[in-house]
Image (tube, helix red, strand yellow):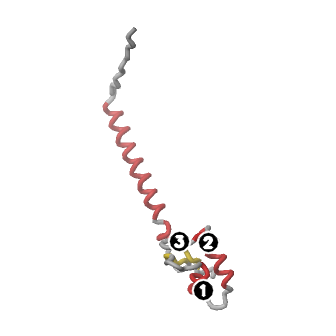
Amino acid sequence: MKSSTVRRHTVIKSKGRFVTFVVFMVIMLAGIMTFAMNMTSSVDAIEDSNFKTVEVGYGDTLWDIAAVNKSEGTDIRQAVYAICDENDICASDLQPGMKIVIPMDRI
């Protein structure tokens, strides 16, 4: 017994609708890509007087970073907590090359 395969061909019945669909999909794709690119640069958007972005170097600890960036009179433990809270990290999560945000108004 032979098995027969039936091939179905898609026929575009309305060229106008097809072109409209393709243009709509291109616009949607461009919008999604623009949104994704803006999300990846959110760290840059945070850069203002209340925040500072620091790149973690080899051998840096959160305590060292907090000590350098905290204001005079601020407890170092409070500064470390504020940095951890802002970046949703623990002190042991630091990796060289990681970028963290320092909340200058909270430390």
Tell me how far mark 3 sits from mark 1, CA to CA: 18 Å
Above or below, 37 against 98 in this view is above
**Which residue in the structure is indicated by mark 3?**
95
Give the mark nearer the N terminus: 3 vs 1. Answer: 1
Left/right placement of residue 9 relative to residue 102 reads: left
Helix, strand or loop status at disc 1: helix
Above or below, 102 against 2 in this view is below
- x%, y% of residue 73? 66, 90
The answer to whether the residues at label 2 and label 3 have Cβ atoms under 8 Å apart is no
Tell me how far mark 1 sits from mark 2, CA to CA: 17 Å
Q: Nearer the viewer, residue 98 or 32?
A: 98
- x%, y% of residue 92? 61, 72
**Kind of residue indicated by mark 3:** Gln
Q: Which mark is residue 67?
A: 1
**Which residue in the structure is indicated by mark 2?**
92
The C terminus is located in which quarter? Answer: bottom right
Q: Nearer the viewer, residue 5 or 18?
A: 5
